[in-house]
Image (spheres, grey):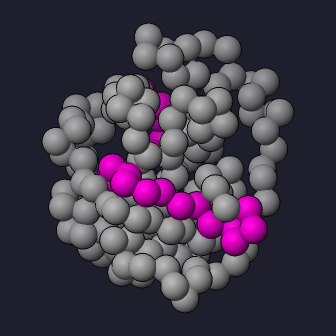
Amino acid sequence: MTKTPGGLVLPDSEDRHELGERGQANQPLPADAVGERFAVHLASGYFVTDAKLGLAELVGAHVLVTDKPLTTLEPLVAILEEVARWGVPLLICAPAITDDARLFLVVNQLRGTIYVAAVDADAPTRARIAAIAGTTATADLAVVTRAELGNAKSVRIAHDAMAIS
């Protein structure tokens, strides 16, 4: 196990074999979910925070929207180290999230280093989520600052839908 200077864990082959995949959220988004609704895909069942409802819920979250698929860990490290220091939840919206990036997020979520949920979403959905959160989509994750992140009062994510306000 390797750690970054900011305390994030860089997963190794043991982490990949030990984790397996937690059951995906399989309930629809509840009718009482507040905010605008979008069709998205929750990147991992490990992001579920309410097992009874099968939802990932974030309150007072920062929002990171990117037009680039999350394919490697390096661009994420700096902003996730900052998010860990701030102690706030983070919603990541990307066109795709590879297994390595997903594993990095899940391992650090399980260790309590960060509180995160990640979703795959198409371009129009990402643009609308960015607008609601008061940000724009970024292409260079390595230089994202807190001021460039959006904010959401409430985010509720089911396996194939999300409500954000």
Lateral position of residue 159 relative to residue 33, left or right: right
Lateral position of residue 165 relative to residue 105, left or right: left
Assess whether residue 42 is covered by the magenta stretch. Answer: no
Picture residue at 33% right of the left edge, 71% below the top: 165
Residue farthest toward the bottom in the current orientation of the protein: 31
Determine the image quadrant of residue 148. top left
Assess whether residue 68 is covered by the magenta stretch. Answer: yes
Residue 6 x, y percent position in the rendering: 43, 16
Residue 123 x, y percent position in the rendering: 32, 69
Relative height, residue 120 to residue 88 (above, below): below
Residue 95 x, y percent position in the rendering: 42, 60
Determine the image quadrant of residue 16. top right
User: Which residues lie in the magenta part?
Assistant: 51-75
Q: Nearer the viewer, residue 80 or 54?
A: 54
Relative height, residue 90 to residue 159 (above, below): above
Picture residue at 48% right of the left edge, 73% below the top: 162
Lateral position of residue 123 relative to residue 101, left or right: left
Relative height, residue 78 to residue 100 (above, below): above
Residue 88 x, y percent position in the rendering: 40, 41
Q: Would residue 38 be visible to someone looking at this image?
A: no
| Image mark count | 0
Q: Would residue 165 be visible to someone looking at this image?
A: yes
Picture residue at 37% right of the left edge, 54% below the top: 60
Relative height, residue 90 to residue 107 (above, below): below
Quadrant in the picture for the N terminus? top right
Picture residue at 53% right of the left edge, 76% below the top: 161
